[in-house]
Structure formats: C-alpha cells, structure tokens
Image: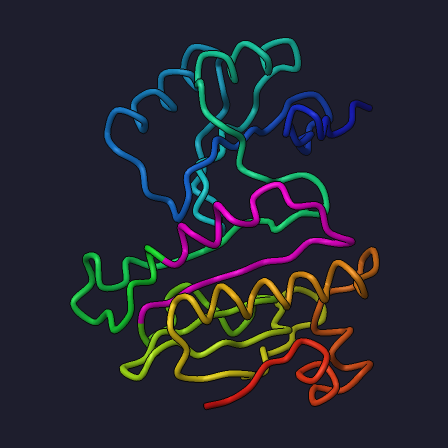
Amino acid sequence: MKKTIPEKNAIIQRDGETYLIVPRTPGGFVDPATLRKIADVAEKYGAATLKMTSEQKMAIVGLKEEDIDAAWSDLGMDAGMVAGPFVKGVKFCLGTTYCRKGQQDAASLGMKLEARYRGVKLPYMMKMAVSGCPSSCSEPVIKDVGVMGTAKGYTLMVGGAAGLKPRLADVVAKGLSEEEVLEAVDRVVEFFKEYGENRKRLGTIIDEIGLEEFKKEVGLWEK
C-alpha cells in the first residue's frame, strides 16, 4: 500500500492509491481567479472531488501519484500544511472586515498568525483559531490556541481540543490588543516547542502541570 508523501504535502486516501493535496488558502479567502485555477487543475488531472476542509482549505481529492508534481506546478501555489507536526492551520472568520457582528479584526489577526507560524516545526500538531466576536464561528474554544474578539479586545484561550479526548480551552488573558495577542501566542508556541511531546496536545500538558503553573511559565495574565 502506498503511503502519505510529506515532502509533497500529499495525503494517501482510503483507496490506498490516490492522494489529496491542499493549496494554501489562509482563512479560506480566495479570489475568483484562484478558485477557477484550483477547479481547472482538479479537472485536468481527473480529481475525484474538491472539498473545503474544516481548516478552511480547498482540498483536491483523488489525484494519481504520477500527477502530483504536475498539479502543484500548474497551481503555482504554496501548500497548506496538512502533513507533519506543524501548526495545522489558523481558522478565522470575517471579523470586522465584512461581518456586521464583528467586534475585532479577526481576518487581519488570523492572516498574521497563519503567516507567522506556517511551516514551524513542533513536537506535535497545533491548531489555532480567531473569532471576531463571542459568537465564535471559528470555534476557538476547541483549539490549542483560541482567540475571541470582544468589545474590550481579544480574549486568549489555550488547550482546547476536539476528537476522542475533547477539552474546552482555558481562558488565560483578556482585553488584549492584536500586538499583545501575537506576543502571547509566541510565548505559548515556544513553550510547546520546549515541553511538547509527540501525540500529546497542549491541553494535556496543561492538565499535567496545572493551569497556574502554565501561566507562570508562559508569562500570561488577565487584565
């Protein structure tokens, strides 16, 4: 049986023969020309389907192994990080850019976080999300690093997860500016680089050492 090819960001599919690739589309924002290009490549190489993933990435599903390199060449796009121990993606909403309910500019912050951590090697995967208001459409409360916009600034949460061992994120700071969020997330990521382990999410580490000890280690605060 064939295997995932991390160096090509190609994920083996259920049939054991075809692959999924994911062009980089931060926050799911794409212009019409890019969307057409993705569709054209999928059609040219006989992909089984296109799928917008839960991480706001447009996956091309069902490519033959011999077509992977050509498909990437035709796309001319960076790969969304789908294979390996990285920040898997930053999910974010429209924020104040478009949404009438937005209280903070989630799209701006989300783009900055995505660019900042794309391709950064970690001990295990990490998921992030930014919402522009307490409606939390991007689900920050079930992400390793979640940021929620409020009328008084951003609330930072850590340690969330879904899956077989779901965990709601802990609030560790409130009333943050965009710059303060970026600085705080830097410290969280550095902590995870140092203390993280394979197949162990951030929330598990927090449970092991205690939330207050984690906040002390990372230097987080509540205003």
Report the residue at 48% width, 45% height from top: 115
Determine if the magenta segment contains residue 198.
no
- Determine the residue positioned at 47% across, 35% down: 24
x, y percentage for residue 169? 58, 78
Can you tell which quarter of the image residue 77 is in?
top left
Q: Is residue 146 above or below residue 37?
A: below
Along the line of sight, the residue nearer the viewer: 54 or 23:
23
Residue 43, x across and y down, in percent:
41, 15
Q: Left or right: 176 with respect to 218?
A: left
Residue lying at the far left in this picture: please name it: 100
Relative to residue 107, is residue 91 drawn left or right? right
Residue 107: image location, x then y, percent: 33, 56
Left or right, 15 with reference to 94: right
User: Which residue is nearer to you in this view: 220 or 43?
Assistant: 220
Left or right of 221, for residue 110: left
Query: Residue at the location (49% across, 63% down)?
Result: 182
Q: Does residue 52 sit above or below 3 in this rendering?
A: below
**Quadrant of the rendered image containing residue 62:** top right
Q: Residue at x 75, y 58 (%)?
A: 193
Position of the N terminus, as image quadrant, is top right
Magenta span of residues:
109-132
**Is the residue 49 above or below the residue 70 in the image?**
below
Q: Check the picture and name the quadrant holding the C terminus.
A: bottom left
Membership of 121 in magenta stretch: yes
Q: Quadrant of residue 185?
A: bottom right
Q: Position of residue 192 (x, y in %)?
A: 73, 63
